[in-house]
Amino acid sequence: MMGWSDVVLALRLCARELRGGVRGFGVFLGCLFLGTLAISAVGSLGKALEHGLARDAKAILGADVSVSLTSRQATDEEAEFLRSLAPVSQTLDTRTMVHVRSESSARAAVLTELKGVDAQYPVYGDLLLDRPGSLHELLADQHSMPGAVVDQDVLTRLGVEVGAVLELGETAVQVRAVIRSEPDRVVEFFSLGPRILVSTETFHNTGLVQPGSLFRAQYRLRLASDVAETVAAQIREAFPEAGWRVRDYTHAAPQVRRVLDRLRVDLTLVGLAALLVGGLGIAGGVRGYLGARLTHIAAMKCMGGSVAVLFMAYLFQMLALSVLGGCAGLAAGAMVPWLADHFFADFLPVHMASGLYAAPLVQAALFGLVTTVAFSLPPLLRAVTVRPAGIFRGYVHTDLTHLPRIALIPTAGCFILLAGMVFWFAGNALLAAWFVAGTVAAYGLFAGLARCIRWLAGAVPPLPWASVRIGLANIHRPGSPGVSLVFALGFGLTALVAVIMVNVSL
């Protein structure tokens, strides 16, 4: 049984081994760095987007509570009830073709998302335009011509500039400005065309609101206190047969949230796949390092070094190096939200709340640590159980590929713990189950295939070509890297294809 003095001795041996630097551990550190970077980056990015969505929820929804109706507007009774709860802003939107006013019969046209807004719009957030001025002044009649503000795509597709006159149904509008940012556009996850904003009066004058027309009326409430869920429940109970959709800001963009959650889970599994493939590199790095130290280990055993002390010494060394590589990966992963917000803010559905999030960093650190221990144990236990008598023969057997019986239980325990962590952190039991099952199946398939190739290499009868005989013998010989190479290539390519397929699906 190990005492405190044995632990101190193991730490001293570990410190002495580390004085030589990290030479020979490049693959080990690189694999661990990339694996922890992938998991921490995905987790931090997901948290930043999630917090950004929660922070800007009212601006994204455009209200504390939103009530929407399809193909009809609220009745007088319904509208009066909504106004009794809080100030209300009404918007109307539909899809329509817009034309450039021209005498030519061949007029350019484009499908657009037409939206009519009242004087209270926007309730939350800011509508950014390419020129100064009040939105409602720009939409008001000037020289008997109502105004409109449009997305740049409208002008580009029609080949016109600001000031052009467009025909919308039975009326015409003049383009007065270009929309740079619309606060509540994120909530409309699916769009068939660029936006045109007009006043609600102009919207009615287009003649597009008719019995049977497909349009949507939205009523946005701004509450004085944080009682959005209560008010939403009151609206549903007051008119249960109204057929309207009632949402509060805590459910501002469910489609975006679902996409972000699925993206986070999928990319986390991609990061785990990268870490597992990196685990093969970790195992190879540990095996190569310890293979070069076997004579040294045998000599220490001859001088009285116990298996327990040597095991602890080299395990401490692997853990110290895993902390070094893992911390570098965590630091890089923690910076990803700031980098993404700086370079890709215009392409993201919400503005991120960049910050340092502990949960994904702890998750990545645990995955990295458990993966390091799981893949380091087999070669480590094989190395410290080497027979010291080999040093007197002038040769110490360096085959660390076989898993010793003593390593079966702790190694299996580490992989079971790793599988449990996948279920814990993934948040989707079915997806985690498929990931774990696929990993186990791939492991068994390629391990069996590698051993079959080794057996076939030994079963081939002697051939007349010396180079072929030597090559086949090297595949079949004890300690051959052929088994590890086939397994690593097969498992790595499988993970690569899985990553590509996930990216294509996303």
Image: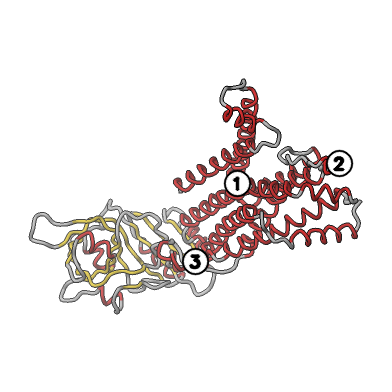
Distance between the Cα atoms at labels 3 and 2? 56 Å
Residue located farthest toward the top when viewing the structure as drawn: 461
Q: Nearer the viewer, mark 3 or mark 2?
A: 2
Badge 2 marks a residue whose secondary structure is: helix
Q: Which residue is mark 1?
A: 277
Q: CA distance from mark 3 to mark 1?
A: 26 Å
Q: CA distance from mark 2 to mark 1?
A: 36 Å
- Residue 389 is labelled as 2
Q: Kindly report which numbered mark, 3 or 1, lies closer to the viewer in this rendering.
A: 1
Q: Is residue 390 visible?
A: yes
Residue 81 seen in the current view:
no
Residue that appears at 65% across and 57% down? 363
Residue 188 image position (x, y, % from top left) = 39, 58
Q: Is residue 237 above or below residue 84?
A: above
User: From the viewer's perspective, is residue 72 above or below residue 179?
Assistant: above
> Which amino acid type is shown beneath numbered disc 1?
Val
**Residue where numbered disc 3 is placed:** 339
As displayed, is residue 113 above or below residue 272? below
In the picture provided, is 118 more to the left or to the right than 410?
left
Disc on the earlier residue, 3 or 1: 1
Task: Identify residue type, mark 2.
Answer: Ala
Q: Amino acid at mark 3?
A: Leu
Q: How is the image coloured?
A: secondary structure
Image position of 98 (left or right of 257) = left
Residue 221 place in picture, x, y as percent? 44, 68
